[in-house]
Image: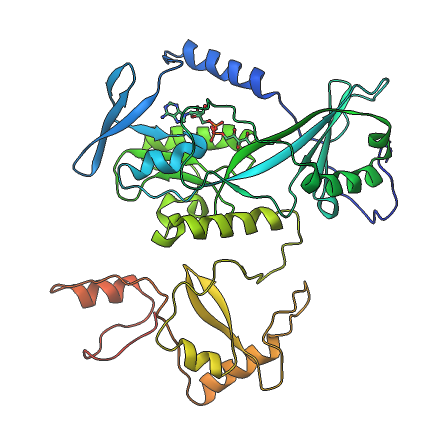
C-alpha cells in the first residue's frame, strides 16, 4: 500500500512484490527491435502477404508472397492467430483459438502517481497499471467467447477490434472498483476488446515442426506475447543457428500437439477453459472438465463401474484413482493432502501385494524391430527387456 496508495486494503491478506519487474510500450519496443535487426543486415518488407509456403519432401524451402517467391533455408511461422491456418496448408498442426480479450483505459486522472507497480489480482480476475496519467485495467476473466473458429478473416488487417461488451465485462470492472476506488471517480476513455490466440494447454508453441524440417513456429502466446517475445525470439534464433535450443523447452514443443487438439469444437471449449481458469488457483492435480471423453480404452466402462475417477491425458480418459462405494467420484482440491490420497494408497498396496490391472492404452507406442532391437531397448531402459514374445515389461 505504500507502493500503491490507490489499492483498497480490505480483504488483502498479502502480496508479492517484484522490484525488478519492468514494463514496455509495444510500439517503441517493436521499432527498436526493427532498428536493431536492420543494423545487423535484416531486410523488412511491410504490407506484403505470405500467400503460401514452399515445401520439398519433408523440408521447407521458402514462401510465396504477394510480391513474389522467396527461397529460404528456414521459415518461422509467427503469424499470430493466423498461424493455425498458415500451417495447416502444409500439414502442420498448431492448435490455436482466438478468444475475446479485454482491457479498459480510464480518462486522465489528475495528479495520478506515476510508475506504480503493476498489480495482478487473481480474485478480481484483473491486472492494473498506470498509463500516461490514466489507469489501465486488463482482464483474465471467466466467460469470454471463442472468435472466428472457422478461420480468421484475412481482410481485416492486423489490429482487429471486437465489439464492446459491458454486460459481460461490467461485473468484473465493478469488482475492480472495489479494489481500486479511484476508478469510480473517473470515466472510461477506451474499452478495448481484441481477439488473442490461446492454446488448449496455455503454453505457446515454440520450435521446429515435428513433420517439416526447418519450419519453425512461434505462436499461441496466450496473451503474454509481449512479455514472452524477447525470450521466445532469442531462443528461436539460437535454435536455428546452433541446431539445438539454448534452453530445454519440452512444454513448448510443437511436437506435443495431438490430432484432436486442432479440432474446432475441442479448441473452442478447451482454450476457453484455460482462459476461464487463468487467474483461478492452480491446485495440484487439477483436472480439465471441458471436451472430455474423446478417447476411451476398451476397459473404460469396466474401470468406471469399479469406481474410477478419470483424468485426461492426450485426449484419453485414464482412471486416476478409485472411489470406494458410497464416496463421491470427485476431486476435492487442496494444497494439503487431497481426498483421493488414501484410495490411491489402497490401490497401490493391492497391486504390490496382490494383483492389479494397468490400462496403458493412452501410452504412445513406438515399434522397434530388427536384429538388435532387444539389446538396444535393454540398453535404453532401466529394466531388462530380454524376455519371450507375448510378455510385457514396465520400463
Ligand atoms: C486486449 C489484449 C491485451 C493484451 N495485453 C498483453 C499484455 O499486457 N502483455 C503481453 O505480453 N501480451 C498482451 N497481449 C497479447 C499480445 O498482444 C500477443 O500475445 C502478441 O501480440 C502476439 O504476438 P505474435 O507476434 O504472436 O502475433 P501478432 O502480434 O498477432 O502478429 C502476427 C502478425 O502476422 C501477420 N500475418 C498474419 N498472416 C500473415 C500473412 N499471411 N502474411 C504476412 N503477415 C501475416 C499479422 O498481420 C500480424 O501482424 C494482449 C492481447 C490483447 C488482445
Q: Nearer the viewer, residue 381 or 191?
A: 191
- How far from the left and from the top, in percent, is residue 155? 42, 24
| Residue at figure coordinates x 51%, y 84% from the top left | 349
Q: Is residue 249 above or below residue 362?
A: above
| Residue at figure coordinates x 35%, y 20% from the top left | 49
Q: Furthest residue to the bottom? A: 354
Q: How is the image coloured?
A: rainbow
Q: Nearer the viewer, residue 279 or 247?
A: 279
Q: Is residue 191 left or right of residue 61?
A: right
In which quadrant will I find the C terminus? bottom left
- How far from the left and from the top, in percent, is residue 184? 85, 32
Q: Is residue 50 left or right of residue 140?
A: left
Q: Nearer the viewer, residue 373 or 124?
A: 124
Q: Is residue 101 above or below residue 390?
A: above
In which quadrant will I find the N terminus? top right
Instruction: Determine if residue 390 is in view.
Output: yes
Instruction: Determine if residue 16 is in view.
Output: no
- How far from the left and from the top, in percent, is residue 120? 71, 39
| Residue at figure coordinates x 68%, y 42% from the top left | 168
Q: Residue 216 falls in which quadrant of the image?
A: top left
Amino acid at each position: 500500500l505504500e507502493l500503491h496508495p490507490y489499492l483498497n486494503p480490505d480483504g488483502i491478506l498479502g502480496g508479492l512484490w517484484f522490484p525488478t519487474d519492468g514494463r514496455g510500450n509495444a510500439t517503441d519496443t517493436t521499432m527498436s527491435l526493427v532498428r536493431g535487426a536492420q543494423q545487423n543486415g535484416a531486410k523488412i518488407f511491410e504490407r506484403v502477404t505470405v500467400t503460401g509456403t514452399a515445401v520439398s519432401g519433408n523440408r521447407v524451402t521458402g514462401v510465396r508472397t504477394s510480391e513474389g517467391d522467396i527461397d529460404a533455408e528456414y521459415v518461422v511461422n509467427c503469424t499470430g492467430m493466423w498461424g493455425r491456418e498458415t500451417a495447416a496448408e502444409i500439414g502442420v498442426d498448431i492448435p490455436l483459438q482466438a478468444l475475446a480479450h479485454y482491457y479498459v483505459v480510464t480518462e486522465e486522472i489528475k495528479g495520478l502517481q506515476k510508475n506504480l507497480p503493476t498489480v495482478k489480482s487473481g480474485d478480481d480476475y484483473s491486472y492494473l497499471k498506470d498509463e500516461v496519467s490514466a489507469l489501465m485495467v486488463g482482464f483474465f476473466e471467466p466467460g469470454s467467447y471463442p472468435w472466428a473458429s472457422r478461420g480468421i478473416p484475412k481482410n481485416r488487417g492486423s489490429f482487429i477490434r471486437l465489439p464492446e461488451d459491458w454486460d459481460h465485462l461490467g461485473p468484473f470492472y465493478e469488482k475492480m472498483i472495489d479494489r481500486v476506488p479511484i476508478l469510480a471517480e473517473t470515466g472510461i476513455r477506451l474499452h478495448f476488446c481484441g481477439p488473442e490466440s490461446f492454446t488448449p494447454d496455455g503454453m505457446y508453441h515454440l520450435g521446429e515442426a515435428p513433420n517439416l524440417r526447418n519450419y519453425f513456429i512461434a505462436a499461441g502466446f496466450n496473451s503474454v506475447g509481449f512479455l514472452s517475445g524477447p525470450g521466445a525470439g532469442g531462443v528461436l534464433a539460437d535454435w536455428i543457428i546452433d541446431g539445438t535450443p539454448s534452453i530445454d523447452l519440452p512444454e513448448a514443443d510443437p511436437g506435443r500437439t495431438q490430432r484432436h487438439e486442432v479440432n474446432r469444437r475441442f479448441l473452442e471449449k478447451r482454450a476457453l477453459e484455460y482462459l476461464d481458469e487463468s487467474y483461478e488457483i492452480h491446485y495440484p492435480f487439477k483436472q480439465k472438465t471441458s471436451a472430455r471423453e474423446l478417447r476411451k480404452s476398451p476397459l473404460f466402462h469396466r474401470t468406471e463401474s469399479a469406481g474410477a475417477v478419470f483424468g485426461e491425458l492426450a485426449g484419453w480418459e485414464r482412471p486416476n484413482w478409485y472411489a470406494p462405494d458410497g464416496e463421491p467420484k470427485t476431486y476435492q482440491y487442496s494444497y494439503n493432502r487431497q481426498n483421493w490420497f488414501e484410495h490411491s494408497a489402497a490401490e497401490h498396496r493391492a497391486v504390490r501385494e496382490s494383483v492389479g490391472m494397468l490400462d496403458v492404452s493412452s501410452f504412445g507406442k513406438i515399434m522397434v524391430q530388427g536384429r538388435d532391437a532387444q539389446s538396444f531397448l535393454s540398453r535404453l531402459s532401466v529394466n531388462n527387456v530380454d524376455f519371450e514374445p507375448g510378455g510385457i515389461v514396465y520400463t
